[in-house]
Image (cartoon, helix red, strand yellow):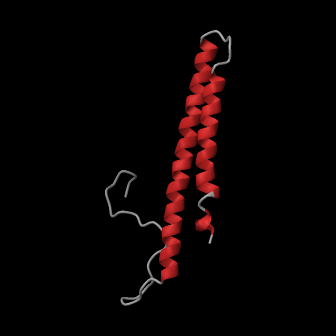
């Protein structure tokens, strides 16, 4: 299949146990849900970092093209840094259950 071929959806997390009547244990389900939660918050963090970094670079480029002067992009960089710090705290510190 090529990269744009339509096929069955990809599974996230570990495969279910082999066998027809085997069931998932509570620990396996909890670990899978925890990893899914972390991967979505990690993806959200990465997207926020990319967008914030792009906005910062665009502001600095506009400042350079405008002839310099007072460095006003510092306010955008400060606000973006605070936003990114908050998102990093939520992803890596406030939700440590994915490490278990």
Q: Quadrant of residue 56?
A: top right
Where, quadrant-wise, is the N terminus in this rendering? Answer: bottom left
Q: Is residue 78 left or right of residue 47?
A: right
Which residue occupies the extreme bottom position in the image? 21
Q: What's the residue at 44%, 79% (across, down)?
A: 16
Q: How many marks?
A: 0
Coordinates of residue 52 in the picture (x, y in percent): 57, 36
Which residue occupies the extreme left position in the image? 6
Judge by depth and name the residue closer to the eye, 2 or 35. Answer: 35
Vertical placement of residue 44 versus 98, above or below: above
Judge by depth and name the residue closer to the eye, 15 or 95. Answer: 95
Coordinates of residue 98 in the picture (x, y in percent): 58, 66
Coordinates of residue 67 in the picture (x, y in percent): 64, 9
Vertical placement of residue 51 versus 62, above or below: below
Where, quadrant-wise, is the C terminus in this rendering? Answer: bottom right
Q: What's the residue at 53%, 37% (across, down)?
A: 51
Q: What's the residue at 52%, 52% (across, down)?
A: 43
Q: What's the residue at 36%, 88% (across, down)?
A: 20
Vertical placement of residue 56 versus 46, above or below: above
């Amino acid at each position: 299949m090529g990269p744009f071929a339509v096929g069955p959806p990809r599974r996230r997390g570990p495969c279910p146990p082999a066998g027809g009547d085997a069931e998932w244990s509570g620990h396996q389900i909890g670990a899978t849900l925890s990893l899914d939660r972390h991967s979505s918050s990690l993806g959200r963090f990465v997207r926020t970092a990319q967008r914030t970094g792009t906005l910062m670079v665009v502001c600095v480029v506009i400042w350079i093209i405008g002839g310099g002067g007072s460095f006003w992009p510092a306010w955008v960089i400060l606000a973006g840094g605070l936003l990114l710090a908050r998102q990093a705290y939520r992803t890596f510190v406030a939700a440590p259950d994915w490490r278990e």
